[in-house]
Image: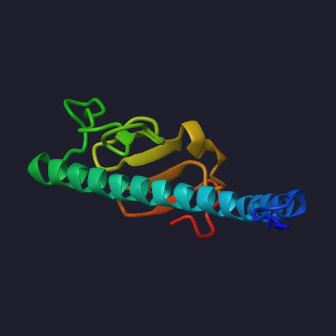
């Protein structure tokens, strides 16, 4: 008489495996999303610094941040510069002859970031809706 050995997973073993995967996913997904928000924020900070340097080069040429009395047209107005925008970059109000403030306003999935809008002015003063730990 032959005996057949069943090999495979039982329903209980499969349910335990699914439960373990669900627990790991519940922990990993928020951590991943938080890391992505931080990465996008860092890119926006670098883009604000790049635009501030661009404005300083303009000022060194004519001792005026403005373009004929008007706000200059920025070389790019989103972050990242290519691809899907996670921040819209613009000036806060009007640019003065010797002063300006740039802002990066979160859009799309980045609106969930606790730091909110990032700002940077001509003196290097940095700001955010939630200032602690955002820069």
**Is 110 on the left-hand or right-hand side of 9?**
left
Residue at 35%, 59% in the rendered image: 46
Residue 12 image offset from top left, x and y in percent: 90, 61
Relative to 1, say whether 56 is above or below. above
**Displayed quadrant of residue 131:** bottom right
**Is 17 on the left-hand or right-hand side of 32?**
right
**Is 13 on the left-hand or right-hand side of 43?**
right
Residue at 63%, 53% in the rendered image: 129
Q: In front: 28, or 112? A: 28
Relative to 24, say whether 122 is above or below. above
Q: In front: 76, or 99? A: 76
Residue at 60%, 60% in the rendered image: 32
**Is 31 on the left-hand or right-hand side of 61?**
right
Residue 42 image offset from top left, x and y in percent: 44, 60
Residue 135 image offset from top left, x and y in percent: 50, 66
State which quarter of the image contains the N terminus: bottom right
Please identify the residue farthest to the left as the structure is shown. Answer: 61
What count of labels does the image hold?
Answer: 0
Relative to 86, say whether 18 is above or below. below
Please identify the residue farthest to the right as the structure is shown. Answer: 12
Residue at 51%, 52% in the rendered image: 118
Q: How is the image coloured?
A: rainbow
Relative to 48, say whether 8 is above or below. below
Q: In front: 67, or 39? A: 39
**Displayed quadrant of residue 26:** bottom right
Q: In front: 1, or 14? A: 1
Residue 63 image offset from top left, x and y in percent: 17, 49
């Amino acid at each position: 008489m032959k005996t057949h050995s069943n090999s495979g997973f039982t329903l209980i073993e499969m349910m335990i495996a699914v439960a373990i995967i669900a627990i790991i996913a519940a922990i990993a997904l928020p951590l991943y999303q938080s890391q992505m928000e931080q990465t996008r924020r860092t890119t926006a900070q670098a883009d604000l610094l790049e635009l501030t340097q661009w404005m300083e080069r303009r000022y060194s040429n004519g001792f005026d941040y403005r373009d004929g009395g008007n706000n200059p047209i920025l070389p790019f107005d989103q972050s990242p510069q290519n691809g899907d925008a996670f921040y819209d970059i613009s000036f806060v109000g009007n640019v003065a002859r010797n002063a300006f403030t740039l802002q990066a306003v979160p859009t799309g999935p980045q609106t969930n970031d606790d730091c909110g809008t990032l700002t940077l002015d001509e003196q290097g003063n940095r700001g955010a809706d939630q200032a602690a730990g955002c820069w």
